[in-house]
Structures are given as structure tokens and as C-alpha cells.
Amino acid sequence: MRKGMRNHLVLIKTGIAVLLLLQVLPTILAAAEDRPVDRFKDNLRQALAIRYDPNLQGPERQADQKRQIWALVDAAFDEESINPLILRRTWPDLTPEARAMLHPAMGWAIKWKFIGKLYKYNVRDISFKEEGIEGDRYLLHARIGTGMFNHRTTFVFLPKNSGWVAVDIIVSGVSLIEHYRRKFDNTFSRSGLSGLMKHLADEVNEEFAEMGYAPATTP
């Protein structure tokens, strides 16, 4: 009788394990295929190629060059996932109208910060190192730049629609999400939605001024 019970328990445990595996299998397969991450790599490589394309140099071509780079970086990161990560404390309490007002300014801040680094440090090289799942995230480690401006960088992806989307950049151990979270959550606590909107506009406009370029459509 006891042997029969033990066998029954083993079957139950095996069945549970199989069900759990079936639940996580789509995520595992998505990571194995790695198509969104591969597209992300391609976008960054293309952005650097455009940055130093001989046909896109000179003042008269700068706007076109930055427009093309913006399109690639814009497609590489997922704004819908970035916004609630930055405003982690306040996002759940915001109305749909308030969220619509804030979207996509926070994502723009991260994207333009990254583009600004490509120009500020004349980044010419990016080499992708190890990558893989860590907890609920997919981490892509890279080295950006050469010589003095060789930065250890990690791109952070979260699962979405059975794949992975890029949401954060960690440079030399500093997360852009964490950087902006401290700024924006504190601003919202002190000054409310209007204060946060102004803060976001200032951040994005500061990046535009440093880059000497702003897209036709801005937050």
C-alpha cells in the first residue's frame, strides 16, 4: 500500500514538473531563438555605421545622420516597459490620462542619453560579450568604445509577448533606470504631475541641445 502511495506521489510530482516546464518553455525558447536580442545588436551596429558613414558627415548632413540613428535606437528600446520601471512608486496610482501625458518622454530620456554618449565620446566600436537569462531578465554584456572611453555596458531585457524587449542600460555599474527613477519619483512627490512633466521636458531638451538636433515629433 505504501509503495503504491509513493508511486502515486512520484507521478503527481512528475506531472507538476511537466506542467511548470510547459509554462516556462515559451520563454526559454524565445531566449534560445534570441531574435529580439539579435535585432537589438543589429540596430546598434547600424547606428555606429551611420555615425561614421563618410556620406553622412559635415554640418549639412548631421540632421539626416542623427535622424537615422534616432530611428534605430528608438526601435531598439521599449517605451511601454520603460515608463512604469522608472516611475515604479507612482505609476500604479496614475490615471490613464496622466500616463498618456507622460508617454513617451521617459523612454526618450534614456534613448537620447545613450545617443548622446555615442557622440560625446566618439564611440566607434561595440563588442558583445556573454549573455543569458538571470532571474526574470535577459542580460547582454558588451564593451562600448576603445582606449580611455572603453565602457563596460550591460543591456537589460524583460520578457514581453513571448520575447524580450530592451529597457535599461547599465554603464560601469550605473543603471539609467535607477538614475532617472531617483530624479523623477522625487520630482513627482514634491511637485506632482505638472512638475514631473516640466522636469521631463527639461531633461529631454537638455539632451537635444547637447546633440544639436531634435526629431520632428517630440514628447
Image (cartoon, rainbow, N blue to C red):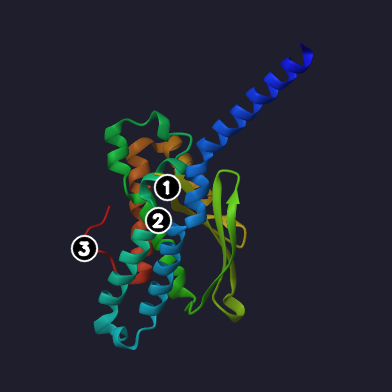
Query: In this rendering, is residue 4 above or below 72?
Result: above
Query: In this rendering, is residue 137 above or below 193?
Result: below
Most extreme residue toward the bottom is: 54
Tell me which amino acid carries mark 3.
Answer: Ala
Q: Position of residue 7 (x, y in %)?
A: 71, 21
Tell me which amino acid carries mark 2.
Answer: Phe
Q: Which is nearer the eye, 66 or 71?
A: 71
* Residue at the image position 42 percent from the left and 47 percent from the top: 82
> How many angstroms separate mark 2 from mark 1 (CA)?
8 Å
Query: In this rendering, is residue 50 above or below 79?
Result: below
> Circle 3 is placed at which residue position?
216
Answer whether labels 2 and 1 touch (C-beta < 8 Å).
Answer: yes
> Circle 1 is placed at which residue position?
82
- Secondary structure under badge 2? loop
* Residue at the image position 53 percent from the left and 47 percent from the top: 28
Closer to the camera: disc 1 or disc 3?
1
Q: Which is nearer the eye, 191 or 180?
A: 180
> How many angstroms separate mark 3 from mark 2 (CA)?
19 Å
Earlier in the chain: of badge 1 and badge 3, it is 1
* Residue at the image position 32 percent from the left and 85 percent from the top: 57
> How many angstroms separate mark 1 from mark 3 (CA)?
22 Å
Q: Where's the N terminus, which quadrant?
A: top right
Name which quarter of the figure residue 173 lies in. Answer: bottom right
Earlier in the chain: of badge 2 and badge 1, it is 2
Tell me which amino acid carries mark 1.
Answer: Ile
Earlier in the chain: of badge 3 and badge 2, it is 2
Mark 1 surroundings within 10 Å by alpha-carbon count, few (fewer than 14), some (14 through 19), many (20 or more): many
Q: Position of residue 189 (x, y in %)?
A: 45, 35
> Circle 2 is placed at which residue position?
77
- Secondary structure under badge 3? loop
Query: In this rendering, is residue 178 above or below 84?
Result: below
